[in-house]
Amino acid sequence: MPFRLKAPFRDALRDAAPRPLAGMWVCSGSATVAEICAGAGLDWLLIDMEHGPNGLGSVLAQLQAVAAHPVVPLVRVPANDPVTIKQVLDLGAQNLLVPMVSSVAEARAAVEAVRYPPRGRRGVGSALARSARWNRVDDYLTEADRYTSLFVQVETVAGVEAAAGIAAVDGIDGVFVGPSDLAASMGLIGRQTHPDVTAAVLRAFEAVREAGLPVGVNAFDPAVARAYMDAGATFVLVGADVAMLARGSEALAARFTAATATAAPDANRASY
């Protein structure tokens, strides 16, 4: 029976006007958490293999968990590595984010890893893989580019300087700017809202937008996220599962352990 794949993220970005698409980082490695986040009403999720405890099995489980929801999943691979990219694509990921792309050559290498020959070097195994639903997707090998979108992450000084060239590479569907690593590369680690870092982010925005591609960014502070949206970001990560759990559990503990400490019950008094 033929199977119809969902449209890739580039189509969602193209059709999103007039508002930017809000997304959430899924770093926990939990399919249950991913499913909860997928039903929250956000536009997209980023399943993270670079800094999250994710391997191929957990990524597969998360892709399956979110598939029934009207949200677009992206997978950030751990590196610009053709073997990993091939495996993640074969799991059925249609949208990839490749980190630490700082040159045109690195952008071209990512494109080659995503595309089948003769346009690239992706290994052919669709008959065995979820990507083509075990050959249930008609003409997958010749139409794979239509089902797949590729985004690269600019997060170094060199990447910002090369942003225009990176965005001009055929096969790149968008550029995501990472202020945290960019700050570190500028000698301002942990200071991603420093004016110099913000200025570099905006330079990257301008270069990517002039090339005609959508540009995204990571910004958990709502005011910063809104500012970047106003500056032209069309897809923004506005939170992360693990960060929300950490802050939420801390607030819960502060509320109830503080109350317990100031109003401890009499040990001799019945609790009922």
Image (cartoon, rainbow, N blue to C red):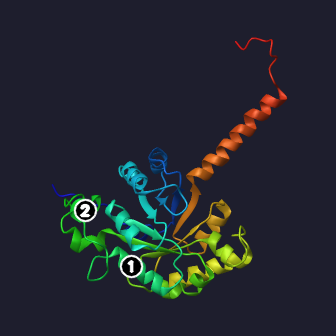
Residue 149 appears in the figure? yes
User: Is residue 9 something that shows in the picture?
Assistant: no
Residue ID at (29%, 62%):
131
Image position, residue 19 (x, y; %): 51, 66
Residue 165 is left or right of residue 142, and the answer is right
Q: Is residue 129 left or right of residue 163?
A: left
Of the 4 image quadrants, the one containing the N terminus is bottom left
Q: Dot 1 lies on which element?
A: helix
What residue is pinned by disc 1?
Answer: 111
3D distance between C-alphas at marks 1 and 2: 19 Å
Viewer-nearest residue: 236 or 192: 192
- The image shows residue 78, relative to residue 117, as above or below, that is above
Residue for point 49% across, 51% down: 29
Q: Secondary structure at mark 2?
A: helix
Residue drawn at the location 80% of the way across and 16% of the way down: 267
Q: Mark number for residue 132?
A: 2
Q: Residue furthest front?
A: 83
Which of the pair 10/134 is nearer the observer? 134
> Are there few (<14), some (14-19), or many (20+) residues within 10 Å of tag 2?
many
Locate residue 35, reporting x and y percent: 44, 47
Neighbourhood count class around disc 1 (C-alpha, 10 Å): few under 14, some 14–19, many 20 upward: many
- Which quarter of the rendering shows the C terminus? top right
Picture layout, residue 184 above or below residue 54: below
Amino acid at pointer 1:
Val
Residue 46 in picture, x, y percent from top left: 48, 60
Q: Amino acid at mark 2?
A: Ala
